[in-house]
Amino acid sequence: MAITLALTVIGALFLVCLYALGGARPEPPDLESWLSGSSTAYHSPALLAAIRET
């Protein structure tokens, strides 16, 4: 049981770090374009954009 808890905690920390390093911030969905079918409501940010060199 301790191994399962440890893996869950490590996985959660990894996902939180991945989100933070992506530089993504919460934003409202673009419902108009989503309802019209021309775009998605949420746009996916690039992973690790905060530390990636451009």
Image (cartoon, grey):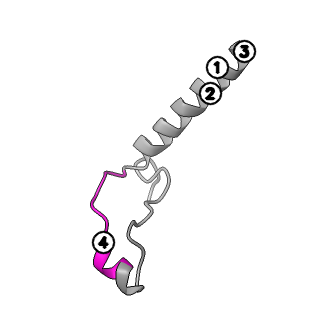
Q: Nearer the viewer, residue 47 or 51?
A: 47
Look at the numbered disc 3 and give the secondary structure of its residue: loop
Residue 8: which numbered mark, if any?
2
Contact between marks 1 and 2 (CB within 8 A): the answer is yes
The amino acid type of the residue labelled 2 equals Thr
- Going 72% across and 15% down the picture, which residue do you hit? 1
Q: Is residue 33 magenta?
A: yes
Q: CA distance from mark 2 to mark 4?
A: 33 Å
In the displayed structure, would residue 20 be above or below residue 47? above
Secondary structure mostly seen in magenta is loop
From the image, state whether disc 2 or disc 3 is nearer to you. Answer: 3
- Going 31% across and 52% down the picture, which residue do you hit? 26
Q: Which residue is mark 4?
A: 30
Q: Quadrant of the rendered structure where residue 5 is?
A: top right
In the displayed structure, would residue 13 be above or below residue 30? above
The amino acid type of the residue labelled 1 equals Leu
Q: CA distance from mark 2 to mark 3?
A: 11 Å
Q: Residues within 10 Å of mark 3 (few under 14, many from 20)?
A: few
Residue 53 lies, in percent from the top left, at 45, 55
Residue 29 lies, in percent from the top left, at 31, 65
Q: Residue furthest top?
A: 2
Q: CA distance from mark 1 to mark 2?
A: 5 Å
In the displayed structure, would residue 46 be above or below residue 20? below
Q: Which residues are magenta?
A: 24-34
Look at the numbered disc 2 and give the secondary structure of its residue: helix
